[in-house]
Image: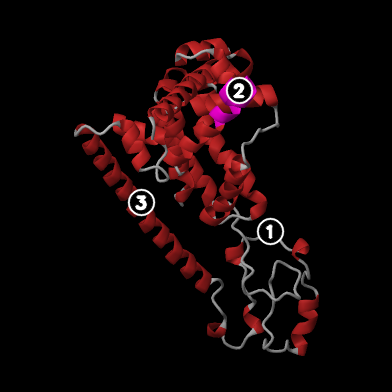
């Protein structure tokens, strides 16, 4: 890398840091390009030459901050909703700029979420899909579930004045708030409707995939009148959970022949969840090992920029700098 390229990269990074601070504090409308230029040690023309406009610079800052968030947190690799909420709370408490940028964007742009190269849309599509996979919920609820869990984790930080009014001096005890939110998320998820299992359903049945096996014994004539009086649709029946659905005992001569509902699927989910937990533990250990190696190399004289280039594609430069500072 030539000296000119190095200077250009250093200038860009200085601009991004200064712009992030400015936009987080003053918002899209209140931020001033001349203050950003002064803080970064460049002239305004340089900013317009690199980014085109203040609005486009804000877009770059927001996406860059979201990328850093994903590198540091990666919350949806956790299957426990309580840990998910706790990790989000910790990040936004220690790194308030992303939340502020999102709030400023919502205030000035409403529902118009700007994107760069489709990264943001893809990020939320993946987040939606992972919520279905990790939390085992129906696709109809995944988006609202994420809104609820994210709101629990960051709303007290987004509106500290409201938190103070509601909690008084206890607002200072953020650890207690974090613990409450985690336990609340766990309790809520225990009663959350799971995604329907359609793996064993007959396509010809339109009622939630529930069927009577083809070899089911015929109903005796003396029971047909009784069964005729029973509800024939789910709408006519009392609300019940999936765990309570059973085939009536008098439909079979031997109760031990009844299949255990979802046993195979549950075992498969358990195995997959265990593999994911093991992979996450291995990833955390590898990350800690890499962080230690980076700090050791830095202590021996390697520059932060050199180390960031060395692990480019694995960790972003802001994450490398954060690890070196720890």
* Residue 58 inside the magenta-drawn segment: yes
Asked if the magenta segment contains residue 54, the reply would be yes
- What range is drawn magenta here? 49-62
Give the left or right position of residue 173, taking residue 110 as reference: left
Measured Cα–Cα span from mark 2 to mark 1:
43 Å
Identify the residue at horizontal 55%, vertical 71% (top origin).
262
Q: Residue at x 39, y 25 (%)?
A: 173
Please give the residue where the numbered disc 1 appears in the rendered image: 239
Q: Residues within 10 Å of mark 2 (few under 14, many from 20)?
A: some
Mark 2 or mark 1: whose residue is earlier in sequence: 2
| Residue 13 x, y percent position in the rendering | 45, 26
Residue at the (67%, 52%) spot, across then down: 140
Q: On screen, 2 above or below 206? A: above
Q: Quadrant of residue 301?
A: top left
| Of 42 and 291, the residue lying toward us | 42
Horizontal relation, residue 165 to residue 318: left or right? right
Which of labels 2 and 1 is toward the front? Answer: 2
Dot 1 or dot 3, earlier in sequence: 1
Q: Which secondary structure type mostly characterizes the magenta part of the structure? A: helix
Which is more N-terminal, label 3 or label 2?
2
Residue 308, position in %: x, y? 36, 37
Q: Nearer the viewer, residue 103 or 165?
A: 103
Say which element carries label 1: loop
Q: Which one is in front, 158 or 107? A: 107
Q: Is residue 156 visible?
A: no
- Mark 2 residue element: helix
Q: Which numbered marker is on residue 104? A: 2
Give the percent coordinates (x, y) of residue 122. 60, 46
Q: Is residue 304 above or below residue 165?
A: below
Residue identified by numbered label 3: 283
Kindly identify the residue that appears in the image at 53 percent across and 20 percent down: 24
Q: Tell me the mark number nearer the camera, choosing from 1 and 3.
A: 3
């Amino acid at each position: 890398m030539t000296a000119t390229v190095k200077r250009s990269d250093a200038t860009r990074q200085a601009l991004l840091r200064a712009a992030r601070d400015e936009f987080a504090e003053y918002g899209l409308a209140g931020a001033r390009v001349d203050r950003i230029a002064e803080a970064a040690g460049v002239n305004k023309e340089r900013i317009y030459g690199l980014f085109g406009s203040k609005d486009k610079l804000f877009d770059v800052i927001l996406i860059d901050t979201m990328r850093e968030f994903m590198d540091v947190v990666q919350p949806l690799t956790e299957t426990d909703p309580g840990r998910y909420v706790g990790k989000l709370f910790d990040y936004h408490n220690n790194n308030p700029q992303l939340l502020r940028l999102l709030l400023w964007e919502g205030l000035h742009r409403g529902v118009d979420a700007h994107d760069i190269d489709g990264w943001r849309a893809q990020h939320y599509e993946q987040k939606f899909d992972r919520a279905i996979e990790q939390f085992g919920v129906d696709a109809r609820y995944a988006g609202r579930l994420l809104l609820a869990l994210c709101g629990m984790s960051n709303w007290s930080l987004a509106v500290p004045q409201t938190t103070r009014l509601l909690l008084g001096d206890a607002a200072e005890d953020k650890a207690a708030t974090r613990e409450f939110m985690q336990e609340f998320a766990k309790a809520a998820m225990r009663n959350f409707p799971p995604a329907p299992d359609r793996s064993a359903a007959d396509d010809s049945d339109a009622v939630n995939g529930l069927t009577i096996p083809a070899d089911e014994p015929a109903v005796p004539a003396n029971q047909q009148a009784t069964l005729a009086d029973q509800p024939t649709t789910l709408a006519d029946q009392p609300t019940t959970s999936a765990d309570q659905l059973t085939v009536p005992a008098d439909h079979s001569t031997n109760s031990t022949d009844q299949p255990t509902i979802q046993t195979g699927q549950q075992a498969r989910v358990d195995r997959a969840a265990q593999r994911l937990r093991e992979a996450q533990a291995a990833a955390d250990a590898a990350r800690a090992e890499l962080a230690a190696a980076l700090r050791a190399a830095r202590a021996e004289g390697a520059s932060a920029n050199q180390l960031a280039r060395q692990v480019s594609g694995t960790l972003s430069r802001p994450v490398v700098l954060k690890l070196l500072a720890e």
